[in-house]
Every structure is written in structure tokens, then in C-alpha cells.
Image (cartoon, grey):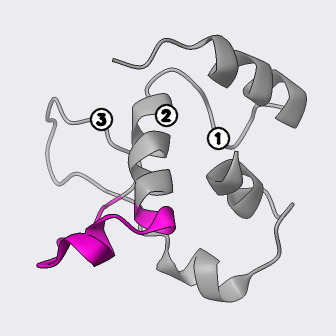
């Protein structure tokens, strides 16, 4: 929900919003990730809250729309969505 709120201006933080990088594929591939996750050499950076939130958002973005779904519907569907 944090990434959804950040993208839909329910959380106003230009600094965090600037750190969200969208993945734009250069060709048709099987990778459907919405957000680009940077590579970190240390586990402490890789395990930060914001990076974990983006990784979970990539899992949910396959089934849910971050931009056109109302907040209550997004919350309900993300709770019942099985994440593998």
C-alpha cells in the first residue's frame, strides 16, 4: 500500500518519489516488472524497507493496476491476492 499511496499522492514525498524507477523494456520480454530495482552490493541496502516494498509491488503489479484502481479496491484485492 505504501508504493500505491506514494504513486497516487496520498503520501507526499518528492524525495521518495524520485527514487521510484519504472522499468521500460527495450523489447518484448517475459519480465513484466513495473519497477526497476537497483543492484546493491550489501545486504543492508538490499533489505531496506523501500527496496522490499518495490519488490513486493512488482509481484502485485502483474495482477493489479497501481494507477487506475481506487484505494479501497486495491487494498482489498492485494489482501486476497496469493503471492507465490
26 sits to left or right of 50: left
Disc 3 + disc 1, Cβ < 8 Å: no
Where is residue 30? Give x, y as percent. 16, 29
The residue carrying pointer 2 sits among few (fewer than 14), some (14 to 19) or many (20 or more) residues within 10 Å by Cα, namely some
Q: Earlier in the sequence, mark 3 or mark 1?
A: 3
**In this picture, which residue range is highlighted in magenta?**
36-51
Determine which of the numbered discs, if any, sits on residue 47 in the image. none
Q: Earlier in the sequence, mark 2 or mark 1?
A: 2
Q: Which residue is mark 1?
A: 66
Disc 2 + disc 1, Cβ < 8 Å: yes
Disc 3 + disc 2, Cβ < 8 Å: yes
**Secondary structure beneath label 3:** loop
- Say if the magenta span includes residue 45: yes
State which quadrant residue 56 falls in: top left
Instruction: Identify the residue at horizontal 64%, vertical 41% (top origin).
Output: 66
Instruction: Identify the residue at horizontal 49%, vertical 30% (top origin).
Output: 60
- Say if the magenta span includes residue 14: no
Q: Earlier in the sequence, mark 3 or mark 2?
A: 3
Determine which of the numbered discs, if any, sits on residue 32 in the image. 3
Give the Cα distance between marks 3 and 2.
8 Å
Q: Which residue is mark 2?
A: 61
**Secondary structure beneath label 2:** loop
Q: State which quarter of the image contains the N terminus.
A: top right
The answer to whether residue 83 is visible is yes
Q: State which quarter of the image contains the C terminus.
A: top left
83 sits to left or right of 30: right
Where is residue 33? Give x, y as percent. 33, 42
Amino acid at each position: 500500500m505504501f508504493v500505491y499511496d506514494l504513486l497516487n499522492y496520498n503520501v507526499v514525498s518528492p524525495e521518495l518519489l524520485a527514487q521510484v524507477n519504472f522499468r521500460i523494456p527495450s523489447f518484448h520480454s517475459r519480465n513484466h516488472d513495473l519497477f526497476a530495482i537497483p543492484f546493491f552490493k550489501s545486504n543492508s541496502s538490499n533489505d531496506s524497507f523501500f527496496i522490499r516494498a518495490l519488490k513486493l509491488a512488482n509481484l502485485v503489479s502483474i495482477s493489479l493496476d497501481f494507477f487506475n484502481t481506487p484505494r479501497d479496491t486495491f487494498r482489498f484485492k492485494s489482501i486476497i491476492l496469493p503471492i507465490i
